[in-house]
Image: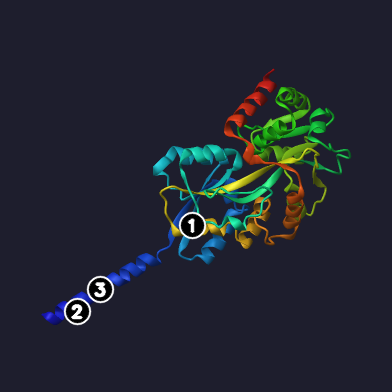
Amino acid sequence: MKKQKILTALSLGLFSTLLSTSVLAEPQTINVYTYDSFTADWGAGPKVKNLFETQYSQCKVNYVSFDSSGTLLNRVRLEGKKTKADIVLGLDNYVLEEAKKSGVFASNKVDLAKLDLPITWKDQTFLPYDFGEYAFIYDKTKLANPPKSLKELVDREDLRVIYQDPRTSSVGRGLVVWLNQVYPQNEIENAWKKLAKHTVTVGKGWSATYGAFLKGESDLVLSYNTSPLYHLLNEQKDQYVAANLAEGGVLQIELAARVVGHNSICADQFMQFLIEPAVQSVLAQNNVMLPVISAATEPHFDALKAEQMKKRVFDPMQVNDKDLKNWVKIWQSSLSH
């Protein structure tokens, strides 16, 4: 009987060990809320997922995609403590104040000393993973005399312009910030009215507006200074150029953040992974944005990054949520009069 008890105990112990080993061996899934172009077949998301799961075989990434960064924040904020998100990837610096106030996000463990940006980044909750400068893109084979300043672009009625609605597009918000950095408050409404005289359309989002530009519906379209690299590297076309405007530009910084109450080693590893050189190369080429680290990623993007670091830019972290909402209202009002 005693021998049987010992054998039974050993069997149970072995079963318990096997069970715990089996549990430990099961991959841990992290839910990443992000935007749909990131998760598209041609986007950076699938490649980042593959690289991450190859390096961290105990982790699995599940993307949950939405149509914009604004929708991302609203969704996770509405879900609150019930959210399934471990990480939100795709916020930008213009919703940062709102995101901080939400109380949804937790600090990360990433070493910020690895970051290399045109501005100093100290926030330990929201992690930059790529960035770009808003720019008006033109075709040099069709526009021989591009504007040399933002004010010239606003004033010249011979230039057909397309940009995005700041209520629905982060790129459109970038133009609102840009104009409000260049013009004093008592001139801003008139500047919008001038621009409206030769604006072909104000589109809901970037994709449709950029597509309209490529079809020849405008001389310039609001996008990023990285856009010409997409055409060069993917289509071998070099006629697209970012207008070099004298006043200096405005940055968009894309951010990822951990969600409060979702403690996960895999999520910590994913956050750190975002700023590894191999991932930064994927993000640069597939998101068509600039890397946030100084290590080599892709030669064309690294060269543009080097130029960008020398340029004058307005610090986007100086823009608060209240001002931005007021500026959008002024833009809307100027178009209705």
In contact (CB < 8 Å): disc 2 and disc 3: no
Asked whether residue 68 is in view, the answer is: no
In contact (CB < 8 Å): disc 1 and disc 3: no
10 Å crowding of disc 1: few (<14), some (14-19), many (20+): some
Q: Residue at the spot x=53%, y=37% of the render?
A: 98
Amino acid carrying label 3: it is: Gly
10 Å crowding of disc 2: few (<14), some (14-19), many (20+): few
| Relative to 293, 136 lies left or right | right
Residue extending furthest toward the left: 1
Secondary structure type for disc 2: helix
Disc 3 marks which residue? 13
Counting from the top left corner in percent of width and height, residue 61 is at 49, 56
Colouring rule applied to residues: rainbow
| Relative to 172, 80 lies left or right | left
Sequence-earlier tag: 2 or 1: 2
Spatial distance from mark 1 to mark 3, Cα to Cα? 33 Å
> Up-down: is 58 above or below 13?
above
10 Å crowding of disc 3: few (<14), some (14-19), many (20+): few
User: Label for residue 268?
Assistant: 1
Residue extending furthest toward the right: 144
Amino acid carrying label 1: it is: Asp
Sequence-earlier tag: 2 or 3: 2
Q: Quadrant of residue 242?
A: top right
Secondary structure type for disc 3: helix
> Up-down: is 222 above or below 299?
above
User: Label for residue 7?
Assistant: 2
Closer to the observer: label 1 or label 3? 1
Amino acid carrying label 2: it is: Leu
Most foreground residue, 202 or 88: 88
Counting from the top left corner in percent of width and height, residue 113 is at 60, 57
